[in-house]
Image (tube, rainbow, N blue to C red):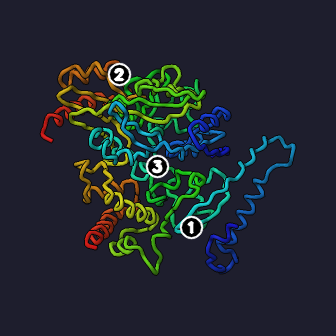
Amino acid sequence: MKPFTYHRAANPAEAVRMAAENPGARFIAGGTNLLDLMKVQVETPSHVIDISRLGLDRIEKTGEGGLRIGALVRNSDLAADMRVRRDYAVLSRALVAGASGQLRNKATTAGNLLQRTRCPYFYETSKPCNKRKPGSGCAAIGGISRGLAVLGTSDQCIASHPSDMAVAMRLLDAVVETVRPDGQPRAIPITDLHRLPGQTPHVETALLPGELITAVVLPPPLGGRHIYHKVRDRASYAFALVSLAAVVGPDGQRFAFGGVAPRPWRVEAAEALNGGDAIAESVTLGAKPTDQNAFKLPLMRRMLGAVLAESKAGA
Amino acid sequence: MAGDMIPDDGPREGDGMTRRSVLASGAVTAAALSAPPAIGAGRPAQPSPPAPVGIKIEINGKSHPLSLDPRTTLLDALREHLRLTGTKKGCDHGQCGACTVIVDGRRINSCLTLAVMHDGDRVTTIEGLGTPDDLHPMQKAFVTHDGYQCGYCTPGQICSAVAVLDEIRRGVPSHATADLMDVAFSDAELRERMSGNLCRCAAYPNIIAAIRDVAERGEKA
């Protein structure tokens, strides 16, 4: 790791101020992604601001009957919370499908949303990567791309977002609450949080530099069947090739895919359609797969069929 | 010095060379070759290491004040600064679980956390679970069931296993849990929950048997 100055923030306002005063600073909460990247010098912050003890670790009911999840709630605690298991089961399922027990015990809600792609070329500093080094090129296009995105890509970047939790959050219409560098709060619907690469793959989120996520808010619970399917090369402890979060019930249906795009992939218009094939066709409109990851498209269609069948079968 | 860490296998016949003497002289040569050039030699100055950060951390019941480069992972603090070498560095990237320790009751990968983030925390390492004269039940079970071959992943497996039984007891769900509201012990649960601890010797069946043994004894107790 490159040397850095370590700071400990006592409260969100101080954390944001420290970030504003120290350009090149990064927040560290769980550290399970940041430290991984710092060890290979993909991330080289000159200042690291420890926010792990800001106390943003509660899960509380909101006035609207939803749930406010503190940014620092550990992934394992969020998955285990009884209200989440009972009323937002797709979120529990998505969380426990990810990583390992050790990692889930350390990783935080906000950190999980902000984790960066596992594209092998992003990690390999000797290779061109427009995300890591704007303008240097994309070694994944024409390279090993099996695990990478088929939707939402550009000619600059085909990286996929690795999170399971984010897919469920997108499905549940979560809202991300932050404190901006000027100290003002704001709320970002999760659909607006992650940016598609376009011509600026190095810009991954709508967050301003030094903006701090403080909580993620879920709307009131949806009824219906909550399902999270994850297709991957191993039975456990592997990223998704394709994952699918779904809530299907008498009030309607919704679907969000992981592993296929630079952010969770949900096409609300598709949810008005009937039958897996029609939904799949709508969801995969505009797909630009590579030879190596084109399998993800029929896989998405089959997963939709399986999830719809499961949702209709007995509990 | 390199010589301190390498057991001396005694003088050899003939040339008087030992492993220790060859490695020690090699290290001296390498150090001489890599010595920094004279001032004004044209190489850019290396940044000075960051100011050390003072913390106090409780390891296996004992409080340790440490002054550390903030880049020091908890794993390196344990192994290099406190000489608690039971915890192993397998991958150093949170992928193998050999570095698993228990911090404030939760298992984590000690390679993916900075020691300075754990000021005031309570850490249990394999050394704290048991000793050769007073084995933890999980250690006993690993011996009984032959739950290891080379032993390198074993401390991480044992720390993880102890924490897994606690997680199941506390009702924490996993990917293997059929009904989220009802977490019960099963082999499938064990395999899923232990999936973050890799074993290249493939002692997995015996590791599962060892953990199951402890779980079943626990229920009877």
User: Viewed as shown, does residue B73 lie left or right of B202?
Assistant: right
Question: According to the image, label 2 marks what residue?
Answer: A287
Q: Are marks 3 and 1 in contact (CB under 8 Å)?
A: no
Q: Position of residue A10 (x, y in %)?
A: 59, 44
Q: Quadrant of the C terminus of chain A?
A: top left
Residue visible at 52% across and 35% down in the picture: A122
In the picture as drawn, the residue positioned furthest to the front comes out as A63
Residue A164 visible here: no
Badge 3 marks a residue whose secondary structure is helix
Question: According to the image, label 3 marks what residue?
Answer: A106
User: Looking at numbered disc 1 in the image, what kind of residue is underneath it?
Assistant: Leu
Which circle, 3 or 1, is nearer the viewer? 3
Which circle, 2 or 1, is nearer the viewer? 1
Q: As rendered, which of A301 and A217 lies closer to the eye?
A: A217
User: Looking at numbered disc 2 in the image, what kind of residue is underneath it?
Assistant: Ala
In the picture as drawn, the residue positioned furthest to the left comes out as A314
Q: Chain of mark 1?
A: B
* Quadrant of residue A136 within the rendered picture: top right
Q: From this view, report whether residue B10 is shown above or below residue A150.
A: below
Q: CA distance from mark 2 to mark 3?
A: 35 Å
Q: CA distance from mark 3 to mark 1?
A: 22 Å
In the drawing, what numbered circle is on residue B84? 1
Residue visible at 50% across and 70% down in the picture: B127
Whether marks 2 and 1 lie on the same chain: no
Q: Position of residue A275 (x, y in %)?
A: 18, 24
Badge 1 marks a residue whose secondary structure is loop
The total number of labels drawn is 3
